[in-house]
Amino acid sequence: MADENNSIIRVENVSMRFRMANDRVTSIKEMVTKMLKRQVEYKDFWALKNVSFDVKRGEVIGLIGRNGAGKSTLLKAILGEIPHTGEITFLDMKENSKKKIKIGYVPQSINVERHMPTTVYDMFASYISDVPVCFKKDKKIYDEIKEHLKLFGAEKLIDKGIGNLSGGELQRVLLAIATKPLPNLLILDEPVSGIDVNGIKDFYEIINRLKTKYDMSIILVSHDLELVRKYADKVILLDKEILKEGTPENVFNSFEFKKRFGEIVS
């Protein structure tokens, strides 16, 4: 476990399992018949199993694993979107007591209609204000949003239609929204999927700046292992349960990692 006095989140023995019929049936009628006769055999399937780790203040954790390893399920558990056993505790760094923290979340992508009239201002304002965006622009809110977008080099996008943004531009806007107000924890779920090389570099430079300037804790899920190696302080290899945890080099050189991903050449 991490140093308690520097941890903002403690995940303890988090598990999630469900039961599925283990029988092969060829029709609904056959399934119903077996159920009525209590002949159906069930098997437990684990989505997560006894996952435990701490997140330190100002730490970037790279969460890796093959498809179906439980990465997205774990993120949903931390976000409070799904039921689970075990505990996820948010801590006060000074007193080591429970507290409510702010969490920012950047999804892998959002569905955007190419011709939708909604602008960056409209979408952003809908998140931070109770005033309907169909009303006249509020200059104070407009200036506040534009100032915050500057942190991400996206202030010139404020009047641009969401449907006209490139992949990199959209992710910068989503990142800006997720960090207004500044969160204690930022969760990034495959944040650079579909972004070109220059966009990826710019995105992670922003992430590094957030970590350094605001001492922000970050959980990063990514299939790009080289980026995880470069930007993560700690890596967690997940396959329903934690197989390996440690520095990027320790995890990447481990038997558990090589068994699943092979050798990664620098």
Image (cartoon, rainbow, N blue to C red):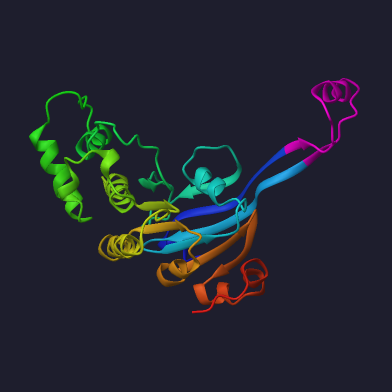
* Front one among 25 and 220: 25
Whether residue 43 is situated above or below residue 253 in the rendered picture: above
Within the image, what quadrant is residue 117 found in? top left
Image quarter for residue 153? bottom left
Residue 90 horizontal side relative to residue 242, left or right: left
In terms of depth relative to the viewer, which is nearer, 204 or 105? 204
Residue 67, x across and y down, in percent? 60, 53
What residue sits 50% from the left and 37% below the top? 81
Answer with left or right where residue 131 lies relative to residue 93: left
Task: Give the residue at the far bottom of this rendering.
Answer: 266
Q: Position of residue 171 (x, y in %)?
A: 33, 50
How far across and down, in percent of the image, does residue 55 sit? 46, 59
Count the marks. 0
Question: Where, quadrant-wise, is the N terminus in this rendering?
Answer: bottom right
Q: Is residue 50 above or below residue 134?
A: below
The one of 218 and 101 positioned closer to us in this rendering: 218
Of all residues shown, which one is farthest toward the left?
139
Residue 236 seen in the figure: yes
Residue at image coords 29%, 33%: 115
Q: Is residue 24 magenta?
A: yes
From the viewer's perspective, is residue 204 above or below residue 74? below
Note whether residue 1 is visible.
Answer: no
Please check the rendered image and state whether residue 264 is part of the magenta-colored stretch, yes or no: no
Question: Quick one: 251 or 114, which is closer to the camera?
Answer: 114
Q: Which residues are magenta?
A: 19-43
